[in-house]
């Protein structure tokens, strides 16, 4: 099964480009503009009267080309499910008369955009000086869709402009969006029409969940951290990572967060001998790694349609063999042809010469957790420069090795501060991908 790209109708086309990378984003972007005498009204989404209309637009935007594989998203009757867990969010709908013809979602949070040296004295080299994060208020655009019958009318541009007005009214200094690098329509809409610039190129890595469990390396112990320990570790070690959310505690305490897991050398610590994070930080082992798991299955599900009977039969055969002979550890293709859920791995990091191997062990542990909870896929998104990337197992045919984030500075009436204009800053080695925006 090959990877895929979106068509202008917002679906996946012929699985030849970016694959199930759409699992971890899934926005559909309309494009094209031409003058029209029709009056387009943009207003806030009203769940009492707009839900069915929005679902109708979602369905008509997800009509796959004949004979091609397409990815369909089921939002479980909740059009704002993908922004509901953000600190501040909004959904707008576009109407012509009484007909809903488009929609857009947006959310706002405070994130790290840079770092500076905090001086305890006049000399920056004095003991105790350390790097501290520089925060900014960042907005994110997702879920932009326009009915195929109403494209090339400027509706997408109007939706973007209106949600940007709301961003500014709520103090956001920057806005960004994500799309595939080869999605020419979306890139042109945002860079040519809306003033965004290409900013970061992360990787979406997707791995199937097999019928057999994986075996994490016996050289490491895996410990589930309490949420307060997880928060302290993230704030201590990762607060200066680009896009790190200031309210990381809200993420870690959300009901969709299934836990934060720490890998350490066997014999150093275990769940029974864990002394607490303060002692861990005071005397850390030579290597360690961690990740957190977010349950996207309870937010929305996906389904691949358009597969031939032969492809379905071949995929089913791999699963039957995997279940019948689990000791062979055969890779199998999950049942993507029925609605399926997935887990998202976020907050990956670590230190030391064994960190990559520890990440691989944590991913095996996360695979088994997803298997036990009935998921068909685990996915993550990391910087293209991420040092631990090689430790993350994935199928290339399902992944997107070069995604594209575009960014825009929303105002000029605020101080550049220590970081300057964030849109012009070079990429770092790591980014923190907020699971609330998947």
Image: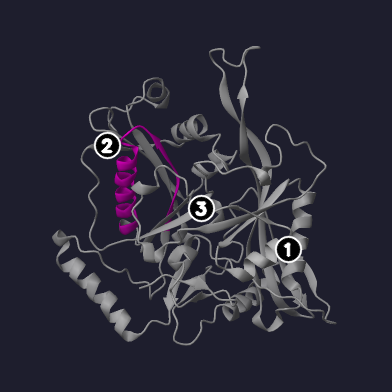
Horizontal side of 130 relative to 267 (left or right) equals right
- Find the distance from the CA under tag 3 to the CA under tag 2: 29 Å
Task: Work out whether residue 253 can be spotted.
Answer: no
Determine which residue is flagged by label 3: 202
Query: Which residue shows up at 28% across the image and 75% down it?
Result: 315
Residue 215, relative to residue 20: is it above or below? above
Q: Is residue 311 magenta?
A: no
**Residue segment shown in magenta:** 343-371
* Residue behind mark 1: 160
Q: Residue at x 57, y 78 (%)?
A: 59
Q: Is residue 268 left or right of residue 190?
A: left
Q: Secondary structure at mark 1?
A: helix
Q: Which mark is residue 273?
A: none
Mark 2 crowd level (few <14, some 14–19, many ≥20, 10 Å Cα): many
Examine the image and state in which quarter residue 68 appears. bottom left
Q: Which disc, if any, is residue 221?
A: 2
């Amino acid at each position: 099964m090959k990877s895929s790209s979106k068509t202008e109708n917002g679906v996946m086309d012929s699985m030849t480009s970016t694959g199930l990378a759409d699992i971890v984003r899934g926005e559909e972007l309309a494009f094209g503009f031409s003058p029209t005498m029709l009056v387009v009204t943009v207003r806030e989404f009203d769940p009492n009267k707009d839900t069915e209309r929005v679902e109708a637009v979602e369905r008509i935007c997800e009509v796959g080309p004949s004979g091609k594989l397409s990815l369909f998203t089921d939002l479980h009757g909740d059009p704002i499910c993908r922004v509901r867990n953000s600190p501040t969010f909004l959904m707008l709908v576009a109407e012509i008369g009484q007909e809903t013809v488009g929609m857009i979602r947006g959310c706002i949070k405070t994130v790290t955009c840079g770092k500076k040296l905090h001086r305890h004295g006049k000399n920056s080299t004095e003991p105790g000086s350390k790097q501290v994060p520089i925060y900014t208020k960042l907005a994110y655009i997702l879920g932009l869709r326009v009915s195929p019958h109403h494209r090339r009318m400027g509706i997408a541009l109007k939706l973007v402009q209106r949600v940007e007005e709301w961003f500014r009214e709520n103090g956001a200094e920057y806005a960004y969006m994500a799309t595939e690098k080869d999605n020419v329509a979306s890139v042109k809409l945002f860079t040519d029409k809306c003033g965004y610039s290409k900013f970061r190129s992360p990787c979406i890595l997707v791995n199937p969940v097999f019928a057999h469990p994986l075996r994490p390396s016996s050289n490491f112990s895996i410990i589930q951290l309490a949420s307060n320990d997880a928060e302290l570790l993230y704030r201590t070690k990762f607060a200066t990572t680009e896009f790190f959310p200031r309210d990381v505690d809200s993420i870690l305490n959300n009901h969709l967060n299934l836990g934060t897991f720490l890998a350490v050398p066997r014999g150093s610590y275990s769940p029974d001998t864990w002394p607490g994070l303060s002692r861990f930080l005071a005397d850390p082992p030579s290597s360690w790694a961690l990740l957190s798991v977010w349950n996207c299955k309870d937010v929305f599900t996906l389904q691949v349609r358009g597969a031939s009977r032969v492809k379905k039969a071949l995929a089913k055969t791999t699963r039957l063999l995997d279940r019948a002979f689990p000791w062979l550890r055969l890779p199998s293709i999950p049942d993507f042809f029925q609605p399926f859920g997935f887990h998202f791995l976020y907050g990956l990091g670590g230190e030391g010469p064994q960190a990559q191997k520890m990440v691989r062990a944590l991913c095996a542990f996360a695979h088994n957790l997803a298997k036990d909870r009935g998921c068909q896929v685990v996915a993550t998104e990391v910087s293209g420069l991420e040092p631990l990337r090689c430790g993350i197992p994935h199928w290339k045919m399902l992944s997107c090795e070069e995604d594209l984030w575009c960014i825009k500075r929303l105002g000029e009436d605020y101080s550049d501060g220590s970081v300057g204009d964030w849109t012009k800053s070079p990429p770092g080695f790591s980014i923190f991908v907020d699971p609330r925006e998947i």
